[in-house]
Image: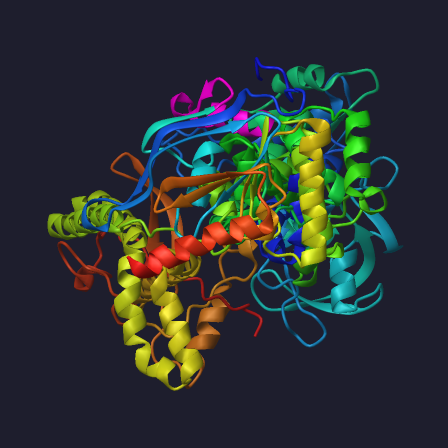
């Protein structure tokens, strides 16, 4: 039996190619997704671990969530704490970290690393004159105001080398600094395509408005002291709004964040893999149905000479297993390729993925093979059952009578009931307003299934409608029409594969289109200004204010009619933490549209506190670097 | 699988019945479209005898064979292979009976195109998961003259060679009875004579029981006994037939058909 099945696979290679392709695509999607996400996640984790290599305990400002008495951020860490930490028992050394952001311009004046984080920090030389976080590869570390060091990837992208001058914007007017060195770093943000500029500590503190203060203090343990021992000795000297964390925990937390970020991406990609497999099922069912129909006499002969129904079904399933396994292995290989291509594609868009090996986890291999084989075998099960029902007499008749077409009455009835129920649910849901979403979604799904069941019934009028077009082709067109009408079930099965694909594509396009339109409408309703100018540079920079000069310079432009600066500040309003936005009371009513439930803009600017309104501008991310 | 011994070996011209039909009827369709293919047929096929079933087209000869061989269902009456009543068997048991006790030779499409000659010959045994009796297999292969062609696929064999493979397959399992449905229908007379010779020899020398459906008087002349069927009924029987005596008998059917 096994031999017969295997020979059949070989004998129908060309026909089975379709099935192999269908399964392969689905499996390749699955394997590609798993390989890609595993590789990226592994690379990020390794790089984040490397980033904590020189650190054992990190001290950071800490604000309790329920601390409503002190709105805003916790105070930064003092030089005194740094000195204390360095001297605390078990500590070998401590260095202070200043974080900020600097927009760097390339030689044409465009922002480097556009769309990603533009970070800045301090070079904190230790006892040996070196900062363990950064390795200088060219030139030297910055030592005085006016000097800056760049990370190697940014330097390469902007074609900068030691000795060049570079235009830098922190806030206020553009500064021109001298590049004194280039360094490499394991910082994850930089690895992901951000830029990092380093100043000497004093300059960094001055630039970022934090003289004598640090954002983080990293402490290195003395030889023989564990991270947790060091942490407990540091805990004793901590001020109220600060906390110490071991590097192990930091790395673990970061790994968790990376994993979470990856898993949502993985889910989204696996959904597409699922759709590919779902469409593939129809192709597999069709191919195997064709094979079974084509081999009616062979199968009948097998039945006549003594193969049981179960054996016939099994032989079809063995064929499916072989096809599925071949497709899964090829798909796995293709998936590994997809993973590699995706990574290099991501690299070429500027988002640099940290280097690392391509990860093909055992679970990836297992999942791919299982998915490929199971989907193929399950899909072939129905045709296999049909094969078993072929009567042995079918081998005898030289002219095999066409299988009696089973009535479509049952199928049409089920389809009609499903479709009617679906329509009823959708209509009912539409009438219910906001609460009707559930019934509507369920109704839509039921309706779609109903239409699928009804496809054989619908095929007749639809093919008849296509008649005039087919008539152009003369006799071949007539034959095509009659062939399509002759077996509505077969026509429906073929059409279903295409229908699923088109349904999904149309559905997604409509959803995406509606959402886009909704967002556009919301933005257009809320925002009347033509431009929003904000600080460039993603997570590192968006929170920082623009220099007051920017507003004044813009206001002087002849093209500008109305301008209002905006400034947000954390606040405590009636016991709750909230955010206050300061605006130009005269200009703002022309720039944003706010629906007042009470009062109006007219009250703004009057010498008394006014109502709080959240500015909608913050969510519409049209940003431009201030340097232009 | 089976409780009975394989391949009943008896001396030539034994009088025991290998298969028997009693009041066997087969009706297709219902109501006005009802067709009675077999009408209370009672017939016996004796062991180690070569029986030919003849009759005009539509006389029910193929249907009789299908019902006797467990390939088709029976409307009423009884059909037995040896002591086994077919009407009481479920599909699985019936399949096993065909596999273990019955050999088949069809007019065309006897072989699986993807298997070579040897694999086709041992197919029923492979399905059963049994090893073939090598000595017997060698003898059968030598008898039908296929020794040099065992590795060939059916499409590499001539029509006569393909039918010889089918004969070998039927004989290899040493079944209680072999049913052959127009085995020489698609062959030229020389290849046909060869195949019929093998069938007759297997009855004479090996004690095999064979039932053959044919409309060719020459083919029927190789048999020991000819059973004539018309309109679903057994109408006559002829022992030790010759081609001429069979032809004469057939002519009478034609004449009767024309006058009635």
Residue A254 visible, this orientation: yes
Q: Is residue A72 visible?
A: no
Q: Position of residue A425 (x, y in %)?
A: 17, 47
Residue A469 position in % (x across, y down):
35, 82
Is B239 part of what is drawn in magenta? no
Q: Nearer the viewer, residue B252 or A397?
A: B252
| Vertical placement of residue A530 versus B114, above or below | below
Q: Pick the quarter of the image with the C terminus of chain A.
A: bottom right
Q: Is residue B76 left or right of residue A268?
A: left
Q: Residue at x 61, y 37 (%)?
A: A318
Of B237 and A348, the residue lying toward us: B237
Residue at 65% across, 19% down? B10
The boundaries of the magenta stretch are: B81-100
Q: Residue at x 63, y 49 (%)?
A: A28
Query: Which quadrant of the figure has residue A218?
Result: top right
Judged by its main secondary structure, the magenta piece is: helix
Say how the picture is coloured: rainbow
Task: Say above or below: B32 vs B49.
Answer: below
Percent position (x, y) of residue B146? 80, 44
- Residue B82 colored in magenta in the image: yes
Give the quarter of the image for residue A485.
bottom left
Tally the numbered discs. 0
Image quarter of the N terminus of chain A: top right
Q: Position of residue A358 (x, y in %)?
A: 74, 44
């Amino acid at each position: 039996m096994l031999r017969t099945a295997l020979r059949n696979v070989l004998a129908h290679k060309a026909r089975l190619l379709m099935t192999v392709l269908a399964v392969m695509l689905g499996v390749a999607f699955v394997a590609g997704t798993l390989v890609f996400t595993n590789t990226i996640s592994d690379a990020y984790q390794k790089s984040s671990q490397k980033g904590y290599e020189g650190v054992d305990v990190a001290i950071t400002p800490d604000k309790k969530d329920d601390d409503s008495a002190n709105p805003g951020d916790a105070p930064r860490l003092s030089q005194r704490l740094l000195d204390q930490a360095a001297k605390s028992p078990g500590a070998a050394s401590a260095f202070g970290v200043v974080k900020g952001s600097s927009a760097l311009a390339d030689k044409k004046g465009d922002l480097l690393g556009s769309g990603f984080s533009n970070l800045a920090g301090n070079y904190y030389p230790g006892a040996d004159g070196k900062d363990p976080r950064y390795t200088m590869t060219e030139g030297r570390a910055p030592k005085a105001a006016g000097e800056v060091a760049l990370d190697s990837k940014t330097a390469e992208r902007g074609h900068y080398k030691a000795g060049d001058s570079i235009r830098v914007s922190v806030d206020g007017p553009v500064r021109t600094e001298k590049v004194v060195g280039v360094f490499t770093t394991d910082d994850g943000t930089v690895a992901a395509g951000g830029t990092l500029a380093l100043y000497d500590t004093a300059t960094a503190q001055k630039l970022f408005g934090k003289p004598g203060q640090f954002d983080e203090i990293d402490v290195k343990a003395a030889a023989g002291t564990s991270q947790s021992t060091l942490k407990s000795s540091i805990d004793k000297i901590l001020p109220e709004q600060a906390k110490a964390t071991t590097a192990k925990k930091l790395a673990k937390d970061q790994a968790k964040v990376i994993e979470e970020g990856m898993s949502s991406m993985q889910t989204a990609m696996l959904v597409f893999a699922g759709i590919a497999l779902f469409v593939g099922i129809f192709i597999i069912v069709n191919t195997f149905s064709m094979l079974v129909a084509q081999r009616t006499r062979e199968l009948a002969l097998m039945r006549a000479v003594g193969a049981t129904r179960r054996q016939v079904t099994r032989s079809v399933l063995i064929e499916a297993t072989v096809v599925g396994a071949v497709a899964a292995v090829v798909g796995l290989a293709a998936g590994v390729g997809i993973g590699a291509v995706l990574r290099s594609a991501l690299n070429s868009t500027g988002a640099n993925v940290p280097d690392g090996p391509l990860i093909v986890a055992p679970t990836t291999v297992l999942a791919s093979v299982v998915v490929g084989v199971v989907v193929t075998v399950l899909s072939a099960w129905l045709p296999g059952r049909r094969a078993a029902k072929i009567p042995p007499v079918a081998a005898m008749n030289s002219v095999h009578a066409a299988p009696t077409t089973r009535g479509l009455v049952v199928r049409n009835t089920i389809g009609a009931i499903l479709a009617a129920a679906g329509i009823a649910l959708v209509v009912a849901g539409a009438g219910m307003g906001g609460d009707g979403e559930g019934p509507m979604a369920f109704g839509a799904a039921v309706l779609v299934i109903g239409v699928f069941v009804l496809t054989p019934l619908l095929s007749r009028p639809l093919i008849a409608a296509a008649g005039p077009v087919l008539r152009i082709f003369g006799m071949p067109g007539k034959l095509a029409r009659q062939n399509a009408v002759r077996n509505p079930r077969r026509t429906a099965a073929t059409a279903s594969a295409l229908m699923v694909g088109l349904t999904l594509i149309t559905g997604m396009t409509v959803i995406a289109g509606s959402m886009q339109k909704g967002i556009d409408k919301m933005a257009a309703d809320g925002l009347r200004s033509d431009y929003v100018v904000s600080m460039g540079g993603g997570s590192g920079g968006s929170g920082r204010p623009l220099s007051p000069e920017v507003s004044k310079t813009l206001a002087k432009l002849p093209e500008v009619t109305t301008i209002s600066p905006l400034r947000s500040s954390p606040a405590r309003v009636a016991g709750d933490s909230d955010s206050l936005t300061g605006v130009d009371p005269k200009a703002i009513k022309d720039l944003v549209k706010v629906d007042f439930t009470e009062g109006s803009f007219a009250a703004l600017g009057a010498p008394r506190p006014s109502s709080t309104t959240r500015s909608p501008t913050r969510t519409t991310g049209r940003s431009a670097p201030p340097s232009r | 699988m089976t409780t009975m011994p394989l391949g009943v070996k008896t001396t030539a011209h034994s009088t025991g019945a290998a298969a028997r039909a009693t009041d066997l009827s087969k009706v297709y369709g219902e109501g006005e479209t009802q067709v009675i293919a077999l009408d209370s047929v009672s017939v016996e096929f004796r062991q180690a005898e070569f029986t030919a079933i003849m009759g005009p087209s539509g006389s029910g000869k193929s249907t009789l064979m299908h019902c006797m061989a467990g390939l088709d269902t029976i409307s009423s009456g009884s059909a037995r292979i040896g002591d086994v009543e077919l009407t009481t068997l479920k599909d699985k048991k019936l399949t096993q009976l065909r596999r273990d006790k019955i050999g088949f030779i069809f007019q065309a499409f006897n072989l699986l195109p993807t298997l070579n000659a040897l694999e086709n010959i041992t197919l029923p045994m492979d399905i059963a998961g049994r090893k073939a009796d090598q000595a017997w297999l060698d003898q059968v292969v030598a008898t039908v003259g296929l020794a040099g062609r065992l590795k060939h696929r059916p499409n590499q064999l001539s029509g006569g060679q393909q039918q010889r493979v089918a004969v070998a397959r039927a004989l290899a399992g040493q079944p209680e009875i072999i049913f052959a449905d127009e085995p020489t229908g698609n062959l030229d007379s020389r290849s046909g004579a060869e195949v019929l010779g093998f069938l007759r020899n297997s009855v004479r020398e090996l004690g095999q029981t064979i039932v053959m459906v044919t409309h060719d008087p020459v083919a029927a002349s190789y048999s020991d006994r000819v059973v004539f069927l018309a309109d679903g009924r057994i109408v006559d029987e002829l022992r030790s037939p010759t081609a001429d005596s069979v032809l004469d008998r057939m002519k009478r059917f034609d004449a009767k058909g024309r006058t009635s």
